[in-house]
Amino acid sequence: MPATESFGAAYRPFDSDAYGSALVGLQGEKTTGEIMRYRFGTEYAYGLHDSTAFFLRAGIRMQFESQDYSIGLGFREKKF
């Protein structure tokens, strides 16, 4: 029966009210009989500690059959 092991880590290199904040993350998984696979992503947030915030995100999958990437934008408004 296949078993999957997984790990992950995230780090916030900076977090400033004036300049925004950044977050990077890495996730890996290994299924019995297969190669190790990785996901890496990053996010920049401006206004994270305010009621309104904007987010830019990017990520990539490595060692998958189709090595995909993703990008995104986000918006948060607490006063809706």
Image: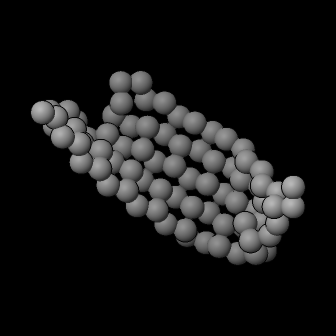
- Taking the image as shown, residue 13 lies to the left or right of residue 77, namely left
- Taking the image as shown, residue 24 lies to the left or right of residue 72, namely left
Residue name at image x 65 percent, y 73 percent = 15
Q: Residue furthest right?
A: 80
**Residue 54: where, in percent of width, then height?**
77, 55
Q: Which of 10 and 4 is in front in this view?
A: 4
**Residue 67: where, in percent of width, then height?**
43, 29
Image position of 76 with respect to 33: above or below: below
Residue name at image x 87 percent, y 55 percent = 80
Residue name at image x 20 percent, y 33 percent = 34
**Residue 16: where, in percent of width, then height?**
70, 75
Mark yes or no: residue 29 visible: yes
Mark yes or no: residue 19 visible: no
Image position of 1 with respect to 28: above or below: above
Color theme of the render? one colour
Image position of 71 with respect to 57: above or below: above
Q: Residue furthest top?
A: 66
- Taking the image as shown, residue 22 lies to the left or right of residue 47, namely left
Q: Which residue lies furthest to the front in this view?
A: 80
Across the whole image, how many numbered discs are drawn on residues?
0
Dividing the picture into quadrants, the one containing residue 51 is: bottom right
- Taking the image as shown, residue 56 lies to the left or right of residue 37, namely right
Dividing the picture into quadrants, the one containing residue 73 is: top right
Residue name at image x 59 percent, y 44 percent = 58
Image position of 21 with respect to 44: above or below: below
Q: Nearer the viewer, residue 57 or 77?
A: 77
Identify the image quadrant of the N terminus.
top left
**Residue 63: where, in percent of width, then height?**
33, 34
Dividing the picture into quadrants, the one containing residue 79 is: bottom right
